[in-house]
Amino acid sequence: MNEDECGGGNVKFHERLIEIILFLCALTAIFGLVLITYFIFREGVPIMFKYGIKKFLLGTTWAPLRYEYGIFPMIIGTILTTLGALILGVPIGVGCAVYLAEIANEKFAKIVKPAIELLAGIPSVIYGLYGLTVIVPFIKKVFNNQGFSILAGSIILAIMILPTIVNISESAIKAVPSTYKEGSLGLGSSHWQAIYRVIVPSAKSGITASVVLGMSRAIGETMAIIMVLGNTAIIPQSILSPARTLTGNIGIEMGYASAEHQKALFATGVVLFIFIMILNIIANMIYNRAGENK
C-alpha cells in the first residue's frame, strides 16, 4: 500500500468519525427535547384530565388553596403582553436592521451594532429593575394608575427582543444578492424604493425567522415580567391593567407549590409548550404562503 492510499484512508476515517460525532450531537439534542417533553407531559397531563381540560383552559379562577386551577387569565395575559412587545419591537427592530444594512456608514454601524448586541447580554433581572424604577413610575405618572401593567411588560419585552430581531434581520438583508438592488436601481427605482420593494421582500424569510425567535423570547421571559406586570391572576381589561403570564405563574408559585398545586403548574407548562408549538406552525404557514405568492 503506497503513501497516497494510506493518506486517503486516514482522511476517510476522520471524515466518518466527524460524521458520527455530529450525528451523536444531533441525537443528543433530540433526546434532550424528548426527555423534557415526556417529563412535562407526564407530570402535567393527568391533573388536566382530572380537573377537566376545558375547565383548566377556560376557567377564570386560579385559587390553589380551593383547588381551582383556571389559567385563562394567564393565557390572555401572555397573548396581550407578547402582542404588545411585537407591535412595539418589530417595526423598530426591522427598521434598525434596514438602516444598519443599507443606509448607515460603516463607522457608525460598527458603533451601533455592538451596542445592540450588548442588549442581548444584559440579565433579564436588570431589565426588570429598569422597568420597576423607570417605566412603571412613568406609566403611573402619565396614566394616574398603579403603573404595573401589560403596557410596562410589553415595553420591557420589546427592548429585550430587539437584539434578536435586529441581528437576524440585518444578516438576512445583507444576504440578498447585490444584483437585485443593482437591477432595481438600473430600472429607475430610488434607493428607498429598492429597499422596500426588492431587498426587504427578498429577505422576508430571515425577517420572519427573527420575529418568530423574538416572539419565543417574549413568551418565555419570566423574571423581568414578574417585576413589572403586577401578577394578578385576573383577566386584564386593558393594556393598563395588571396581569400574569403563564411563565410568571410558574415562576412565582413553583417554589412553594406541592402535591396537586405543583402538578397544576406543570400542566401550565404543558399549555405553554403547546402554545409555542402552535405559534411556530402558524409562522411557518405564513412564511410558506408568502413564498408561494412571491
Image: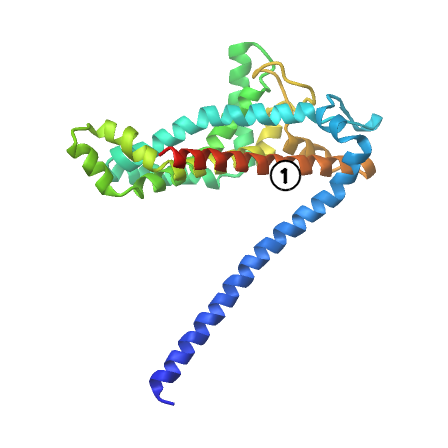
Q: In terms of depth relative to the viewer, which is nearer, 206 or 290?
A: 290
> Which residue, given by chain and number where applicable, does mark 1 sit on?
273
Q: Quadrant of the C terminus?
A: top left
Find residue 136 and report its image quarter.
top right
| SS label for mark 1 | helix
Left or right side of 175 for 119: right
- Is residue 282 left or right of 8 when viewed as pictured? right
- Tell me the crowding category of disc 1: few under 14, some 14 to 19, or many 20 or more residues within 10 angstroms, Cα based: some
Residue 51 is at least partly visible in this image = yes
Q: Is residue 262 visible?
A: no
Q: Position of residue 231 (x, y in %)?
A: 66, 24
Relative to 2, say whether 231 is above or below. Answer: above
Identify the amino acid type marked 1. Answer: Phe
Q: Left or right: where does residue 141 sit relative to residue 91? A: right
User: Residue farthest to the top?
Assistant: 144
Quadrant where the N terminus sits is bottom left
* Residue closest to the far front: 292
The residue at 29%/35% (across/down) is 199
